[in-house]
């Protein structure tokens, strides 16, 4: 008794609207016996008469009218659900969960999100600020659809990773320091350092850059928020090695940027679950690909 058939409810509502079994059959493109069977099965399941068969017109009983009012809401919800799924299948609507670092979020993603808002307004992009490791785990576990991750990464079962961008890592220094035109590991290792925390790929890249020159500096402080690091550099607290993302804001007057020797790059990749992505995810992947460095 709990299980109501939506097709039967639609038949009941159509009969009530048109006042005729025959007219309902024509409108629904059903055989007349099928329309009668729908009503008979509903009445049998509910153990109640739902329609009064009068000579000129069929009208609902009191119980039938109450059911018809609820049926209209159920059918409207069902139609809306089908339409919503159709919009998602067509890539016109949906939700995409994206994990990215603060740097990528602040300076690289705005252009992508602007494109999505303009071309795919029905797609809701939900962004989480995460390290590469957590973003990859989220993609693998299904809590994220896409992750922007530092490269290289070890293969992850069920996850596809492709290169996306390569941004230069530069030295961010307090303007009051007497700095050479290019910054070497030996020169920088003798100064106070502010570095990303040890959970990040950038931390490992930075330490490897020093180690290749035989240096093992100790950081004055470790953070995982690049804007906070830049604020400390501007305050004269120390120097930092950070990627210079395209579109980044102008540098604070109290800070200067210098190239490294040897040079250092921060490559980024895009990760998503292997296989055919959902249409909304595909739309965001295409928007990300549009600003991929060749």
Image (tube, rainbow, N blue to C red):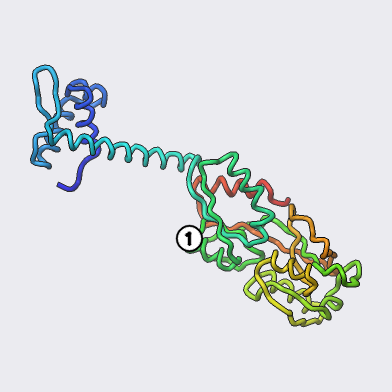
Visible residue check, residue 160? no
Residue 50 in view (yes/no): yes
- Neighbour tally class for label 1: few under 14, some 14-19, many 20 plus, Cα within 10 Å: few
Q: Secondary structure at mark 1?
A: loop
Give the image location of residue 124, x and y in percent.
51, 48
Image coords of residue 26 (percent x, y): 24, 21
Q: Quadrant of residue 89?
A: top left
Q: As rendered, which of 231 and 226 lies closer to the eye? A: 231
Q: Is residue 179 left or right of residue 219?
A: right
Position of 287 relative to 31 (above/below): below
Residue at the far top in the pictured view: 56
Residue located 70% across and 64% down the image? 227
Location of residue 240 (image quadrant): bottom right
x, y (%) of residue 212?
Answer: 79, 77
Q: Is residue 83 above or below residue 174?
A: above
The count of marks equals 1
Please give left or right for residue 173 compared with residue 110 in the image: right
| Nearer to us in this view, 105 or 87 | 105
Q: Residue 55's image quarter?
A: top left
199 w.r.t. 254: above or below: below
The residue at the point 60 percent across, 60 percent down is 100
Q: Where is residue 12 drawn, in percent x and y?
A: 19, 31
Instruction: Give the labeled residue for mark 1.
Output: 143
Residue occupying the point 48% across, 39% down: 90
């Amino acid at each position: 008794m709990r299980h109501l058939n939506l097709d039967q409810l639609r038949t009941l509502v159509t009969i009530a609207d048109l006042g005729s079994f025959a007219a309902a059959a024509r409108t629904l493109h059903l055989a007349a016996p099928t329309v009668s069977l729908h009503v008979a099965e509903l009445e049998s399941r509910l153990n109640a008469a739902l329609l009064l068969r009068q000579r000129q017109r069929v009208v609902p009983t009191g119980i039938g009218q109450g059911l018809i009012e609820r049926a209209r809401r159920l059918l409207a919800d069902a139609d809306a659900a089908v339409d919503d799924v159709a919009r998602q299948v067509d890539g016109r609507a949906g939700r995409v969960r994206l994990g990215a670092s603060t740097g990528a979020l602040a300076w690289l993603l705005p252009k992508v999100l602007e494109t999505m808002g303009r071309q795919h307004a029905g797609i809701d992009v939900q962004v989480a600020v995460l390290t590469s490791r957590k973003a990859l785990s989220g993609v693998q576990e299904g809590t994220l659809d896409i992750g922007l991750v530092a490269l290289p990464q070890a293969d992850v079962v069920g996850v596809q990773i492709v290169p996306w961008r390569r941004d230069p890592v530069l030295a961010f220094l307090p303007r009051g320091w007497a700095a050479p035109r290019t910054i070497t590991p030996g020169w920088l290792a003798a100064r106070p350092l502010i570095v990303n925390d040890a959970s990040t790929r950038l931390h490992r890249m930075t330490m490897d850059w020093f180690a290749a020159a035989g240096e093992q500096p100790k950081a004055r402080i470790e953070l995982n928020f690049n804007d906070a690091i830049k604020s400390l550099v501007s305050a004269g607290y120390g120097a930092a090695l950070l990627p210079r993302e395209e579109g980044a804001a102008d540098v604070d007057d109290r800070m200067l940027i210098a190239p490294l020797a040897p040079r250092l790059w921060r490559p980024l990749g895009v990760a998503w679950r292997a296989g055919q992505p959902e249409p909304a995810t595909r739309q965001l992947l295409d928007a990300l690909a549009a600003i991929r460095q060749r």
